[in-house]
Image: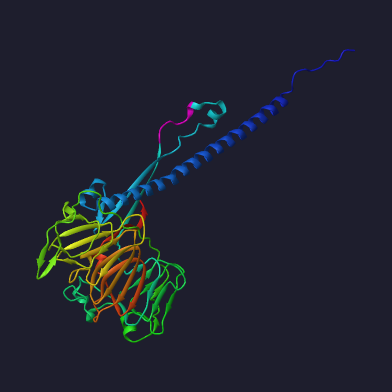
Amino acid sequence: MKLKTNIKPKASVLLVTLGAISIIGLGLATYLTMVKFESQATFRSLAWNTAIPVTEAGVEEALTQLRYAGTTNENLSANGWTLSGGLPVITCSASVPMPSSLPSFYGMLLGAAGTADASPSFANRTIQVTVTNTPLLGGPTSLGFINMNGNNVNVDSFDSMDPKYSTNGLYDASKANDHGDLATVSGLTNVFNVGNANIKGHIHTGPGGSVVLGPQGSVGDAAWVNGNNKGIQAGHFSDDMNVQFGNADVPFTSGYSGPPNNPLTINGTSYSQVLSGDASLGTGRYQFSTLSGSVYVSPGANVVLYVPGNADLTGIVLGTNATIKIYNGTKNGSGQSANMGTGAGSSGGHSWNFQYYGLPSVTTITYSGNATFTGTMYAPQANLSLAGGGNNTYDFVGCFVVGNLSMNGHFNIHYDEALKRFGPNRNFVITSWNEL
């Protein structure tokens, strides 16, 4: 007896096989599509986020250009910038390449590399920042300790460009203001020794810094100090001073003159050298190896003087409306000193008429005696010693930034608030940041 075998596959098996293949294919296609969009989203997000550091780098470059090129309309228009309130508004855009569209899942399944979208695309982001040119001398400042010894040490302020707070541009005790803020960048314990001083203003330390007072010390507004109140008035101390001060630098390496041999006698006073010219126009730039003796700056002159060696500034006298910037010391080394003596400064002039910049090698600045100083000092590595004081209240007028401050005996500091508007600046800093 013969048995017949049906060797033809049943249709149901074929259908099941085709169904399984379809489900697997659909799952694979779905997975590849998900991977595609996930990868595309990741790379697009990376490009989008990368655009911001690029724009910020552009802002940094803009700030560098402003530092060296200034803010003339010509410089601004060359970059498409504008002025707002006399300050530049910087707009910076960045375009970062976006990834091309990935192949479709059919292409991925078939290995069709040529199915990608070759058209380029970019992530474009634009930010706009406003800046301000902060004053270099926003108040008498030390990078380290402040030690105020002795009695009758007083600090207040005035404004040489405001008749409400000065008389003919000079400090007037009857018009004094109470913005004589003192600050130290340091955050050490007891870094600020007020002693028995009277400070009409605020005191600031670095984060975590603290203050020690003597029994007669008084810090606050004019009503608080004049009312014979002791201690620190509420709201007149903070430990939020967080500012960096760069080193003073050599003003020039060429295009200057040596000490002139042109002695002159004015009103019975003999001067060994007379300086003249306008440094902003290429004249009025001098370099002395050391400085001593009497120097007269001609009326209206704008002089820049570089002295790499020791400097005795006692004998410098400024003519009417004359300005001098003295750069003293070298970039390397230490132990160098400068003597302000008893007669340095712009007698009767504005604080910015006499500017002293101590380079890193200058570590000591002394000032003493019964005379007045009107000017500014910027020497972040130097220890400034103010000693003696005169018989009146007109001792130190202007401002300083030094490494450490020590005051002894009867002494008065009068901060000129006009330096915030007319004095040297610390360069531009950002005040607002917006994405357009």
Check residue 400 for magenta coloring: no
Using the image as rendered, state which of residue 110 and residue 265 is in the foreground: 265
Left or right, 21 with reference to 214: right
Left or right, 241 with reference to 323: right
Pinpoint residue 180: horizontal percent, then vertical percent.
Answer: 31, 74
Q: Is residue 412 above or below residue 297?
A: below
Residue 139: quadrant of the picture:
bottom left
Using the image as rendered, state which of residue 282 and residue 23 is in the foreground: 282
Check residue 116 for magenta coloring: yes
Q: Please say whether residue 98 is visible from this viewpoint.
A: yes
Q: Please say whether residue 320 is visible from this viewpoint.
A: no
Residue at 47% over, 72% down: 189
- Image quadrant for the N terminus? top right
Q: Is residue 286 above or below residue 216?
A: above
Residue at 74% over, 23% down: 10
Residue at the outermost bottom position = 228
Using the image as rendered, state which of residue 35 and residue 242 is in the foreground: 242
Q: Is residue 261 above or below residue 152?
A: above
Pinpoint residue 361: horizontal percent, then vertical percent.
Answer: 34, 59
What secondary structure is the magenta-colored segment mainly? Answer: loop
Pinpoint residue 344: horizontal percent, then vertical percent.
Answer: 22, 69
Q: Which residues are magenta?
A: 114-120
Figure coloring: rainbow
Residue 220: quadrant of the picture:
bottom left
Pinpoint residue 372: horizontal percent, then vertical percent.
Answer: 23, 74
* Total labels drawn: 0
Left or right, 375 with reference to 401: left
Residue at the outermost top position = 1
